Image (cartoon, helix red, strand yellow):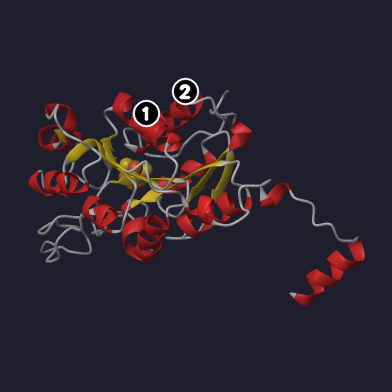
Amino acid sequence: KEFRNNVKPNWCPGCGDFSVQAAIQRAAANVGLEPEGLAVVSGIGCSGRISGYINAYGFHGIHGRALPIAQGVKLANRELTVIASGGDGDGFAIGMGHTVHAIRRNLDITYIVMDNQIYGLTKGQTSPRSAAGFKTKSTPEGSIETSLSPLEIALSAGATFVAQSFSSDLKQLTLLIEEAIKHKGFSFINVFSPCVTFNKVNTYDWFKENIVNLDQFPDYDPTNRVAAMNKIMETNGMLTGLIYQDKTRKCYEDLIPGFAQEALAKQSLDITREQFDNLLAEFK
Ligand code: SF4
């Protein structure tokens, strides 16, 4: 069960994405997956490279489109564990339409966002997660927009699993990814993953000072959606841990009549070569 490959990541030393990669590899091994049972689909951005750094099926998609591809992979072969991943620019700007609809659709996949509150690959511009006043090359006087709240959006869109973690807390992050993989439905995990090169505000130290770990609230009930929304708002979205889980709702695949049979990718087309060629010709 070896999820490491021999590709050396070209992230900057200290980038938070290294921990996300390690956590996915550990979680996959801990839940007993085999490399051929896992598909990692990513979008564009520094974090999008992650699909090439894990020994599993990998698909490096296009900007903001990790989720449509991941959903297609899952529908074609529901026997695969599918993890989609990308950055906050990828998932919350160009990809936000897909993010909201994938959440409400509730396919049995895991979506991990590496949230560094800036565009790293293009050398440091304001992202949808940048705070008001954040100064970058694209907002030299400070951003006049407010940051969006991914946790509030996920909960509002009908998510059945919402969690948040921090690259420095590898133990918590690994456990949450394990729970997300085991969850029968769409699992959303936002990860504070610092960009050490371009974001000099939201640093490791800044997150350590501002994060509110759910462990501080022993009576917290993650099945209570209203309480989850209240706690997210009370903590200004800085909450980490398993924030909400609904185990009662069926996932999308289980609502499709007859879909529980053999995975589509493994079914015989049951046609002759000539019929297959004719079928292909229709699409040319
Ligand atoms: Fe990570 Fe930022 Fe470097 Fe990109 S630019 S690899 S996000 S530290």
Q: At 48% across and 26% down in the image, what residue appears?
A: 31
* x, y percent for residue 168: 26, 29
Disc 2 residue type (three-letter): Asn
Q: Is residue 243 left or right of residue 111?
A: left
Q: In this rendering, is residue 85 above or below 66?
A: above
The mark found on residue 174 in the picture is 1
Q: Is residue 9 left or right of residue 148?
A: right
Within the image, what quadrant is residue 101 found in?
bottom left
User: What residue does disc 2 label?
Assistant: 30
Q: Is residue 60 left or right of residue 172?
A: right
Q: Residues within 10 Å of mark 1 (few under 14, many from 20)?
A: many
Position of the N terminus by quadrant: top right
Q: Nearer the viewer, residue 83 or 248?
A: 248
Q: Residues within 10 Å of mark 2 (few under 14, many from 20)?
A: few
Which quadrant of the picture is home to ligand 1?
top left
Q: At 15% across and 65% down in the image, what residue appears?
A: 145
Residue 216 seen in the current view: yes
Q: At 91% across and 66% down in the image, what residue appears?
A: 274
